[in-house]
Amino acid sequence: MPNYYIIMADVVHSGEHNGSQLMDSFKEIVNSVNSAYESEILSPLTITWGDEFQGVISSLEVGISIIFHLEEEMIHQGADYKLRYVLLYGEIETSINTTVAYEMLGSGLTDARKKIERLKSQNNERILISIPSDLRIPLNKSLLIYTRLIDGWKYSDFPLISAFIKAIGYKAVAENLGKDRSLMWRRSKSLRMDDYFDIKYVIDYLKTSK
């Protein structure tokens, strides 16, 4: 049976959020991925249980790029919730549904759901990569550093963090926001934006290594 890259995610502590606001935001960011990565998605990211989605994608590289896209889109939106992800290479026995990620069966899908459930008991992890490769451990360790960093950011700082992600560089942010350069330099350091871009670089390098 063929193997595919499967991505699943759910909202952490979804019951603690306003249901309608959460769903509106969740649908928006999922739709943004399906639009941005349309050519690389085999079965589109589909919300299955209200606070979860699943999809089938073309590669490990695309899967990690999608995770980065989702995390940054939530910052740009000012979303006050977190997602928990599993990116897994596993078997799908049925045909791939290219319209919606329903009506597919296989051990890979079952295993991905079990791993999502397992992550719920591990408070320090939000992203799990499960692939038959020597890259698995360094990728997971690097993603753990990545999530520790971004999970330390305050919700109130999201507008400024969004500006740093979009502009890349405190001088550009200062100019765009009409702020003092020295203040933006200090805020960049306190938010560890250099560390953010550095760990993303490392993960991007690892995901393309063979």
Image (tube, rainbow, N blue to C red):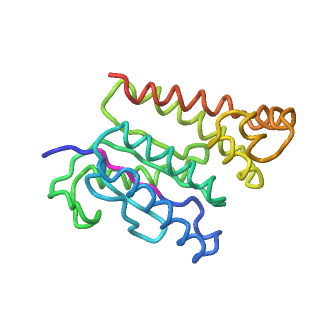
The magenta-colored residue range is 5-9
Q: Quadrant of residue 145?
A: top right
Query: Residue at image x 16%, y 54%?
Result: 93
Report x, y in % for residue 116: 44, 53
Report x, y in % for residue 113: 37, 55
Asked if 74 appears above or below 65 in the picture, the reply is below
Asked if 192 appears above or below 18 in the picture, the reply is above
The magenta stretch spans residue 8: yes
Query: Residue at image x 84%, y 43%?
Result: 179
Q: Is residue 101 left or right of residue 130?
A: left
Total number of numbered discs in the rendering:
0
The magenta stretch spans residue 123: no
Q: Quadrant of residue 206?
A: top left
Q: Is residue 47 left or right of residue 3?
A: right
Q: Is residue 2 left or right of residue 109?
A: left
Prevailing SS of the magenta stretch: strand
Q: Nearer the viewer, residue 46 or 39?
A: 39
Query: Residue at image x 58%, y 66%?
Result: 14
Q: Nearer the viewer, residue 128 or 95?
A: 95
Query: Residue at image x 54%, y 47%?
Result: 126
Q: Quadrant of residue 33?
A: bottom left
Q: Is residue 90 left or right of residue 76?
A: left
Q: Quadrant of the C terminus?
A: top left
